[in-house]
Amino acid sequence: MSDWRTENAKHLRGLTLHRRRWTKPRDDWDHDHCVGCQAKFAEFDGPEIQHEGFTTGADYKKGAGYEWVCRQCFADLQSEMGWSAS
């Protein structure tokens, strides 16, 4: 059964993702979103804010930490998307 999150994350198919704590990459960047479900990653606290998840590595075309996947999407989609974790 296809999941709408799979369509959102299809550009990450087959990658090794890295479990990390989210930190802002620069002072003017305060959050990111899960490529699957759009959950918010941030350092600040708030309703439904994610503080850690899975991110792209240095081998990704846009670099390490560029794309994020929340823990729930990773668990739900890992097999279908062919993701591995480090």
Image (spheres, helix red, strand yellow):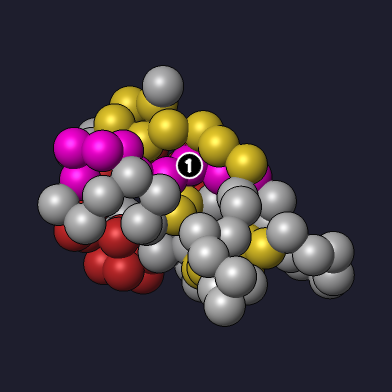
Which quadrant would the N terminus be assigned to in this image?
Answer: bottom left
Q: Which of these two is toward me, 10 or 67?
A: 67
Q: Is residue 76 visible?
A: no
Q: Which residue is mark 1?
A: 54
Residue under the point 62% across and 41% down: 21
Amino acid type at mark 1? Phe
Location of residue 81 (image quadrant): top left
Residue at (50, 59) in percent of width and height: 25
Instruction: Pick whichever, 3 or 40, lies toward us.
Output: 40
Name the secondary structure under disc 1: strand
Can residue 18 be seen? yes
Going 41% across and 22% down the picture, which residue do you hit? Answer: 86
- Please name whichever residue, 85 or 80, is drawn nearer the observer in this view of the structure: 85
- Crowd band around label 1 with a 10 angstrom C-alpha radius: few (<14), some (14–19), many (20+): many
Q: Is residue 57 magenta?
A: yes
Where's residue 77, x and y in %?
39, 45
